Image (spheres, rainbow, N blue to C red):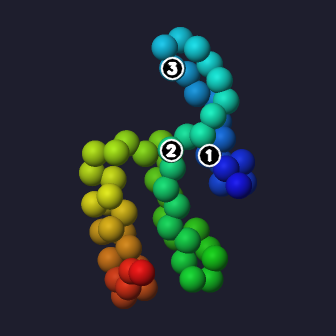
Amino acid sequence: MVEAYGAWKKKKIYGKEFIGVVRSTFIIDPEGTIAAVWPKVKVPGHVEDVLATLDKTEGGERT
C-alpha cells in the first residue's frame, strides 16, 4: 500500500541512506478518489490543516 501511494521512498538521516516510509496523509473521498495529499508531513500544525481541509469538503462532515 505504501508503494502504491508513493510513501515508500529513499530517506537520509544522519548521513545514512535507506528506504522507508515517508510520513504522509491522504484524504480519500467516499468515491475512493484521493481528495488531498500531504507528503513529508511535519507534526506541528498538521492536524489543524487536515481538519480545515475536511471542513471544506463534502459539507464538512467528519466521522
Residue 7's disc is: 1
Q: Earlier in the sequence, mark 1 or mark 2?
A: 1
- Up-down: is 20 above or below 45? above
How far apart are the alpha carbons under marks 1 and 3?
Answer: 16 Å
Residue 23's disc is: 2
x 42%, y 81%: residue: 63
Q: Give the total number of marks visible in the rendering.
A: 3
Q: Earlier in the sequence, mark 2 or mark 3?
A: 3
Q: Amino acid at mark 1?
A: Ala
User: Is any part of residue 56 visible from this angle?
Assistant: no
Q: Secondary structure at mark 1?
A: loop
Mark 1 surroundings: few (<14), some (14-19) or many (≥20) residues within 10 A: some
Q: Are marks 2 and 3 in contact (CB under 8 Å)?
A: no
User: Is any part of residue 40 visible from this angle?
Assistant: yes
x 37%, y 63%: residue: 50
Q: Are marks 1 and 2 in contact (CB under 8 Å)?
A: yes
Mark 3 surroundings: few (<14), some (14-19) or many (≥20) residues within 10 A: few
Q: Are marks 1 and 3 in contact (CB under 8 Å)?
A: no
- Up-down: is 9 above or below 46? above
Q: Earlier in the sequence, mark 1 or mark 3?
A: 1
How far apart are the alpha carbons under marks 1 and 2?
Answer: 7 Å
Q: Amino acid at mark 3?
A: Ile
Residue 61 image position (x, y, % from top left): 38, 85
Q: Secondary structure at mark 2?
A: loop
How far apart are the alpha carbons under marks 2 and 3?
Answer: 14 Å
User: As drawn, is 41 to the left or to the right of 1?
Assistant: left
The residue lying furthest to the top in this view is: 15
Q: If the image is split into quadrants, where does the N terminus sit?
A: bottom right
Q: Amino acid at mark 2?
A: Arg
Residue 4 image position (x, y, % from top left): 72, 54
- Image quadrant assignment for residue 57: bottom left
Residue 13's disc is: 3
